[in-house]
Image (spheres, grey):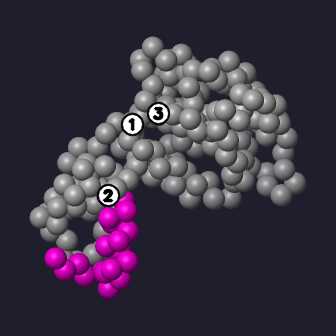
């Protein structure tokens, strides 16, 4: 099921109904934000992280995590980064053994329309897929307003300055916002 990134950012609970979700695209900052929101929402889950290369070297490690339950935690979240078409067969196997106490989130760079992994996720109603395209000035302006909500003195001129200074890069903008939060702890922004 194709999910719009802006809807997922507003309501991370949309991901709860999918056993496995693919998050791909060129917007690294957006993917990081979504990953952080996933970690917060599923805070009572055990978190396990792999790269595609680790799994390809020994695919038993993923199968063991999917099949075995932990004594300490009943629920698991598995993050797999750097996904490409090399892992498509393993994804197909995992889809056959869905479990309600496990959520798998796959992160990839930009996948073209011919990508077999992308096609698997776009055609299935049991899986989620989110494309994270580059932000524009409007989406970044909304992002700054959301992150600096409750701060006084924030003007459109300041927002434009931050966006231009970041080069339309959400990750850079995130760091700039964190600097502002640390400098203006009284929540009153002064130019």
> Is residue 105 covered in magenta?
no
Query: x and y percent of residue 182 in the render?
Result: 37, 77
Q: Which residue is located at x 14 percent, y 63 percent?
A: 156
Determine which quarter of the picture holds residue 189. Answer: bottom left
Considering depth in this image, is 8 or 34 the residue closer to the camera? Answer: 34
Q: Are marks 3 and 1 in contact (CB under 8 Å)?
A: yes
At mark 3, the secondary structure is loop
At mark 1, the secondary structure is loop
Determine which quarter of the picture holds residue 130. Answer: top left
Q: CA gap, disc 2 to disc 3?
A: 20 Å
- List the single residue furthest toward the right: 71
* Placement of 110 over or under 43, stated as above or below: above
Query: x and y percent of residue 34 in the render?
Result: 47, 48
> Is residue 188 covered in magenta?
yes
The region drawn magenta spans 173-191
* Placement of 49 over or under 175, stated as above or below: above
Q: Which residue is located at x 31 percent, y 73 percent?
A: 180
Instruction: From the viewer's perspective, tell me whether residue 9 is left or right of residue 86.
Output: left
């Amino acid at each position: 099921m194709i999910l719009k990134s802006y809807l997922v950012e507003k309501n991370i609970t949309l991901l709860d109904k999918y056993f496995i979700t693919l998050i791909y695209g060129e917007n690294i900052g957006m993917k990081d934000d979504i990953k952080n929101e996933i970690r917060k929402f599923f805070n009572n889950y055990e978190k396990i992280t792999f790269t595609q290369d680790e799994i390809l070297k020994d695919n038993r490690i993923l199968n063991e995590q999917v099949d075995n339950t932990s004594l300490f935690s009943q629920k698991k979240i598995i993050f797999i980064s750097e996904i490409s078409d090399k892992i498509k067969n393993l994804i197909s196997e995992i889809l056959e053994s869905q479990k309600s106490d496990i959520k798998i989130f796959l992160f990839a760079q930009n996948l073209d329309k011919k990508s077999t992994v992308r096609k698997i996720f776009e055609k299935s109603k049991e899986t989620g897929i989110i494309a994270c395209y580059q932000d524009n000035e409007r989406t970044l302006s909304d992002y700054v307003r959301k992150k600096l909500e409750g701060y006084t003195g924030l003007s459109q001129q300041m927002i434009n300055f931050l966006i231009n200074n970041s080069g339309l890069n959400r990750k850079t903008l995130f760091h700039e916002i964190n600097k502002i939060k640390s400098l203006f702890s009284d929540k009153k922004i002064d130019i």
